[in-house]
Image (cartoon, helix red, strand yellow):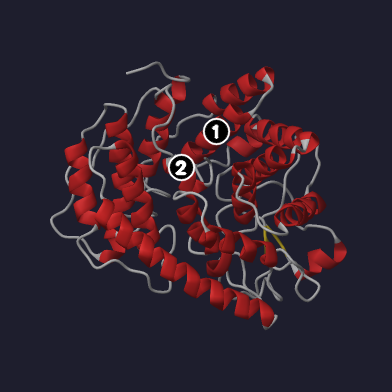
Amino acid sequence: MTTTRGRNVSATPTDPFRTPPDSTSSKWGQSLAKGAPGITLLHITRATTGAGDWETVHAWIAACLRQPVLSTPGTGLFFGAPALAHVLRAAATAGPRSYERQITALDATVDRMTERRLAAAHQRITQRDRPIFAEYDLIYGMTGLGVTLRARGDSHLLRDVLTYLVRLTEPLRDLPGWWTDTAPSGDSSPHYPGGHGNLGLAYGITGPLALLALTWTEGTRVCGHREAIDRITHWLDTWRQDTGTGPWWPEAVTPAEHRSGLTLQNGPLRPSWCYGTPGIAHAQHLAALATGDLPRRELAEHALLACLTDPRQRTRLTDDTLCHGTAGTRLLAHRLAARTTDATTMARLHAAADAIATLDVAPAEAGLLEGAAGTALAHHTLTFDRPAVIRWDSCLLLT
């Protein structure tokens, strides 16, 4: 094993998932968020670093593929065909088997899903209705499908997704185009009359921002691409709260807040990947690098560093999960630090990430986002000081 990057990542958790179950439901077998695909990603990453074996990977992939592949409503990057495509492509990139036949079939399914959902999304915009999260977000929506397509390289369909995201950012009935009629939970709530504008990376507009920035940097660009990045970042600037402990952003904006220009949220959320300062700062950092915006890059770095070193914010981390715990926050901070060109800032970010205490709280489930597999995967990834063979965390928009 190579050297580690700090005391908190030195002890990779013992793998509790050696053998897949004899039978799996499609709900568990095809859920990247909660089930077998996330566990499979852990085994793939371990195999690429010599800490695991490929036979275990193949056994888990077989478990993922036992049931007919799902592409129904409710599927997306973290469930169904796109989730399986993400995992099999990672295995084929680094492992001894190509899985060519399975990947080809999954890609065709994802293409059909994407075309169908793009048509519905454009029709919705033309009718001037508001979207739901699952239309555009990272977890189930077009941003997640764009991540799946991006893994295959530049394509007309990826450009079609980006064109849709550009259109999503255009104002709709005097509100941002991504404004939903629901609460942040995705449900109707009397606390959110008139819905809200969401700033989170998992469900909000910073997910599309991160994908738009990554593809711009890679040279996959569409008409209005830069303007869409600018519209989102300007909106984030509007809602930035500058305090003595560093800038932060609200979780969501209500119609009343939109009219007044003032948030009623009294302080930053927990510093997590899915919501809160780390995810929002990360997306802006990607946008700043894409567009050459030095002040925004420095702002994003300052916001993340201030967040990680604020004791009050760190105490809000109550578990070690990837989605909203220490594992995801630490991984995000190291990824952002690696993109930083200033050596001092880079060192401070790495140190701040490593100083986040690992919590002795066992995840309640086994999956990727809120389970033990995601925690182990983040810890294992940070343990090995070597270039990543696979970009497993592209599903988190971190690479």
> Considering only vertical position in the picture, is 140 above or below 251?
below
Q: Is residue 354 left or right of residue 200?
A: left
Local SS, label 2: helix
Residue lying at the far bottom of the rendered structure: 127
- Whether residues under marks 1 and 2 lie with C-beta atoms below 8 angstroms apart, the answer is yes
- The residue under the point 58% across, 74% down is 121
Q: Is residue 236 left or right of residue 15?
A: right
The residue singled out by tag 2 in the image is 393
- The residue under the point 76% across, 40% down is 247
- The residue under the point 58% across, 72% down is 132
Decide which of tag 1 and tag 2 comes sooner along the chain: 1
- Write down the quadrant of residue 180 in the picture: bottom right
Give, as a three-letter code, the residue at label 2. Asp
Q: Distance between the residues labelled 1 and 2?
A: 10 Å
> Considering only vertical position in the picture, is 57 above or below 380?
below
Residue 265 visible in rendering: no
The residue singled out by tag 1 in the image is 335
- The residue under the point 48% across, 75% down is 116
Of residue 328 and residue 391, the one placed in the foreground of this image is 391
